[in-house]
Amino acid sequence: MSSFRHKHILGIEDLSREDIELILDTAASFKEINTRDIKKVPTLRGKTIINLFYEASTRTRTSFEIAGKRLSADTINISASASSVVKGETLEDTARNIEAMHPDIIVMRHGASGSPHYLAERLDCAIVNAGDGAHEHPSQALLDMMTIREHKGEIDGLTVAIVGDIAHSRVARSNLYGLTKMGAKVRLAAPGTMMPPGIERLGAEVYHDMNEAIRGADVVMMLRIQLERQGNTMLPTLREYARYYGLNPENLQLAKKDALVMHPGPINRGVELSSVVADGPQNVILDQVENGVAVRMALLYLVSGGEKAEE
Ligand code: CP
């Protein structure tokens, strides 16, 4: 039996360093299953997992589905755009109707910050946050930490620069909570309009000059401009943004020689990341995606009680 005590995974803010280490160790132990000829173990046989997505997703939805299936759970996907949400059904009614079918876990993505917490207070099944508004994206930060740990050995003592639209980024917030708990120094870089006031109170060092933020960094994590959340009121032009806040072969040289280049996806090529860097030798972007399956297997397993069946 594991020592994981959380019924839900709502955010990294709620997790201790020991919780994060347990999740990363569990994910590392599951990772090998994904390269077997027969990629399936009976660990979650008989469990039902519903992926309830109110926002678009490629990586997160697919990898939660694959993770559930590789652990032998029955996994069902619901996209809001193809559900009765378009007829006006509320989040709570939708969730209560889904719960009447007795799922064990609801994995949920929603544009409103706090919506997974709202459901966790009202439903009996476990809720896993797959991204809520600009608040948290816990499974993304965990797969990022797994990738950093694999490449660098440990997270403690590293300097991680996170550059981009911090204000609208649930990835930045979850990584800030997680990386500081794991002992890393986190630098955040963004134009003033994309930096939330007071974020330094969460332990970040705040920069407006990207070059200063990435100088000597062990990891450079680039973020997408979230035009769907900010409109186009926060930057003059994408070209100007790319000039001051884009990562290219020239400014990447300011980071450590062996610095990792990370991005949660989807990438705006030529805006926050040049294609040369996105596809270059320091990028670990597809390692992040690969680790996403293992991390999500670990989360589904741990919120299910953490007892391993025969494999
Ligand atoms: N990183 C991430 O959340 O990607 P998707 O939006 O494709 O799930």
Image (cartoon, grey):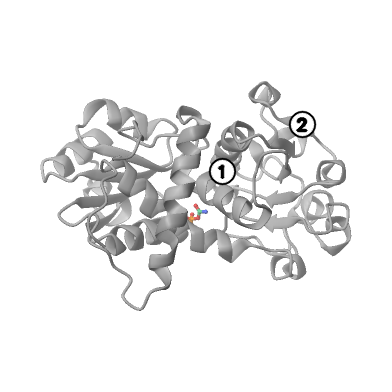
Assess disc 1: are there few (<14), some (14-19) or many (≥20) residues with their C-alpha within 10 Å of its C-alpha.
Answer: many
**What residue is shown at x 46% (from left), y 31% (from top)?**
15
Answer above or below: position of 261 versus 32: above
Locate residue 159 relative to residue 102 in the image: left or right: right
> Is residue 25 in view?
yes
Front one among 173 and 47:
47
> Label 1 amino acid?
Val
- Quarter in which the C terminus is drawn: bottom left
> Do we see residue 57 in this rendering?
no
Q: Residue at x 57, y 36 (%)?
A: 178
Question: Label 1 CB, ligand 1: below 8 Å?
Answer: yes
Relative side of 195 to 83, left or right: right
Q: Earlier in the sequence, mark 2 or mark 1?
A: 1
Element at label 2:
strand
Ligand 1 neighbours mark 2 (CB distance < 8 Å): no
Q: CA distance from mark 2 to mark 1?
A: 16 Å
Q: At label 2, which amino acid type do we have?
A: Val
Classify mark 1: helix, strand or loop.
Answer: helix
Would you name the residue on which mark 2 appears?
Answer: 206
What label does residue 213 carry, if any?
A: none
Q: Which residue is mark 1?
A: 171
